[in-house]
Image: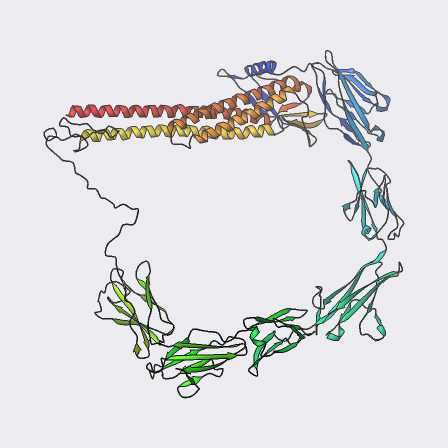
Amino acid sequence: MTSGRVIMKYGRARMLHKKDNKGFYTMTWTGHTLAFLALLVIVLVPSPSDGVTISVIGSPVNGLVDGSATLSIFYLSSSLPAIAWQVNEITIVSWEVGLSSSLRVTSNYKGRVTTYDNGSITISPLKLTDTNVYSVSMTATGEKPGMNSVSLQVYAMIEGGSIAVNPQTPSEGKPLVLTYVTTQGDGVATWKLNGVPLANDSNHVISDHSLIINSASQKDNGVYTCLLENPFSSQAFNTTVTVAYGPNNVAVLPSTFSNSTPISYALVGNNVSLQCSADSYPPATILWSVPNSPNNQLVNRNPLNLTNIQANQAGNYTCTAYNSARGSGATSSYALNVYQYPASNISCSVSTLNLISLQFLCAWPGAIPAASLSFVGLNPPVTGAGSLTTVVDGSSAPNLKGKTVTCVGVHPLLAKNCSLQISGPPAFSPLHTATLDPTSGNVSLMLFYPINVQPPATFQWFKNGTQLNSGGKYVISNNSSVLTVLNLNTSTDLVTYSCVGSSPVGNQTNTFQLTGPAITRTGVVANSNRTIITLTWEIPLTSVVSGFLVQKLGPALQRSFNARDTSPSWETIHTKGPSDRSDDVLGLNPDLTYQFRVIPALGQTQGSPSVVQTIGPDKKEKIPAGQKPVQTRQKTQPVRTPNPRLVGGVIPMSNGVGGVIPMSNGVSASARRPPSTISSLSQISSHAAQKRTLLRLLHSSCFMGGGLFCAIVGNILLVVSTATDYWMQYRLSGAFAHQGLWRYCMSGKCYMQTDSIAYWNATRAFMILSAMSCFAGIIAGILSFAHFSAFERFNRSFAAGIMFFVSTLFVLLAMAIYTGVTVNFLGKRFGDWRFSWSYILGWVALLMTFFAGADTAKSHFVGEASMTWHYGELRREKYNSVALATMKD
């Protein structure tokens, strides 16, 4: 290590860092710094006088024949110790550190052992017999002896590996042994089957060099790999094993020519392929037994293809698989079903037979096999296939009224239902419509009877008790459910009508009185702007109408609101049909009033007008509930007088707090306020004071922001420095190594610091406390911006500054302890060492936390002084305003 150099500049000591040609950082220390660190080390770090401590770096150590292996250790001792290495309690090498003449080596290791001052040894060239546990002991004057041990394993390169199989042709159910052999070297063997590692179980036993399979089966087929490896070489050798087995798992897989997806049935006309599969080695011979074949002839063909299959080819197809090598066989059968979809959908109906009986029919034709049909709801149920017919006599037909009879159809491909709701002619309200011929002006009236009943009914029509027949002005439909009255006469045709419906289930008579056009109720709904309305109306059930007239009384309808012409009489604006019950009216002016009504009409005959609906603006503006009326205030102008004292005037004052000065006549200074030059000057002074205060507060916030930035950077550096492993770099036994507070690393591998050493524990604790204190200060600093109260803000900024200074103290203690111990103890044990970048980040973090504390404290004091000055200025302006007012008076 380069000796320390003292560099003085302007009376201050400094540390210098530079990077040498080996990639290490060199640190030079000033005299004042070294003296301070040495004092801390003497006070805080105990001297390692309890005994010699030996630490092993990496165990076990692996070596290659004819190669070298280093048994690496390092020790802590107050003096140079005597070192001895032993194997099986026999000393193979011993020496005293610093005394080369004290070296002693046994004959077996003569010329093969190299020693180092840190206690490590290197053995070269290695032999297979060097594999053992090596013990090291150290004794030093005035200290307890120290001991530790290192394991050494020597390997040879693996060459010439292969696997022997016994027997060479394994058979299912017999034992099988696989053994690996090599021409040189050995190691740990891993057996795999098709890339999957094998383990000991009831059927597999892994011994020293063999894999034993107690009972071979088809599961044991595949590529066996033996991976033999040691730390310096590895070799994988394979062999393929196939066990003669089967035939097992014989199965038939049916599919179509165009699609290999398995099918559960075949449709008529399809091409079907039957594939027979069997697990067998060697492959089995396949023979087919085909139904309906002459003399039960066997077919030696796989797959078995059936083209344009028909219904007579359905049956059991049997596959026989035979393994000639093992003299065994197995069979599997498949029942091939051949289907055809029904030609149409299922249908059902009920009709009247001889006017007294009911005939039910259900059909679902064209299916192979024929669909199964059954009537559910009849007593007893009736079943059949393809087509089903049954008759219910007149005595039982009335019992079906109100019931549901369902025809259920079932086919292997699908199922369908068809339901019939049995009912007699229902009671109904009059269904009618009137149609106006615009050419002749004649009206036709149609009366309807519901026909959606099962079974269909027959109807008779009566007018005032007299049966009507089709002819003349009366027309009756073929199913007698509709009566049409031509050239309707409102005087003679709006009378009482009756309809009598008859069926085997029951009879029903409906009588109703038709009336002229009328409207029972109307309504109106407007949009939010009152520019569009919707008129609605209703008519009696027995009222006959052929249309409606929508009329308006009031201003004309328009798109804009310029025209305000008012119609003096009712005018028809829309004509609606007999089925309409509403009408939309557009183009209303929300500021005008309109009236609307609806007149029903039957041909040229008009009924009574509906109730008039009025829409227009409100007569009085209403204030919504819960809202108070707005009161306007009139601004009062100040009264200007030649002499305010003579008329009781006042001089307005601006004292910063809204105060007024009462005059001698008892009138408040806020009552009349003539303009004043003194008031203007006072306001200008107040604004200038506020501006200066805001500028000082802005400066305070800038200091706080800078402090938080330094603190965040410092906190990140503290975490990185504490967690990384580059506090110190050194060379141990010719190898590059580095260590941190938690681990040490060498040869690309890292190990945890398992020894509990006081200076390591102290450095870790102080670094963690420093990071926690800095983080707490950052939180307090951020919270100082979160409130508008000035005193709360500056108190939190002060607390943040204290936490940053505490963090600086903790990181200073951590760095001082680590520096002192490293320079005085560890540095003497390693020939070439340097401080590294993790250590340097710790010192940079110290500077950042210090600057963060300084900026935060400055922010606190600047802000507090600004507020104190601001309140002083306010009081001063108040007193000046009062004095100026008095002088003016």
Residue 668, position in %: x, y?
A: 18, 30
Q: Camera-side residue: 59 or 23? A: 59
Residue 487 image point, x, y percent: 36, 84
Estimate the x, y position of residue 194 in percent, counting from the top left: 78, 49
Q: Nearer the viewer, residue 183 or 506?
A: 506
Q: Quadrant of residue 3?
A: top right
Q: Position of residue 663 (x, y in %)?
A: 15, 27
Query: From the image, which quarter does the N terminus lie in?
Result: top right
Image: 654 above or below 80: below
In the foreground, 808 or 490: 490
Q: Is residue 251 above or below residue 677?
A: below
Q: Quadrant of residue 313?
A: bottom right
Q: Residue furthest top?
A: 142
Q: Is residue 341 visible?
A: no
Q: In percent of the image, x 31 and y 25: which residue is there?
A: 871
Left or right: residue 847 compared with residue 267: left
- Residue 426 in view: yes
Q: Quadrant of residue 813?
A: top right
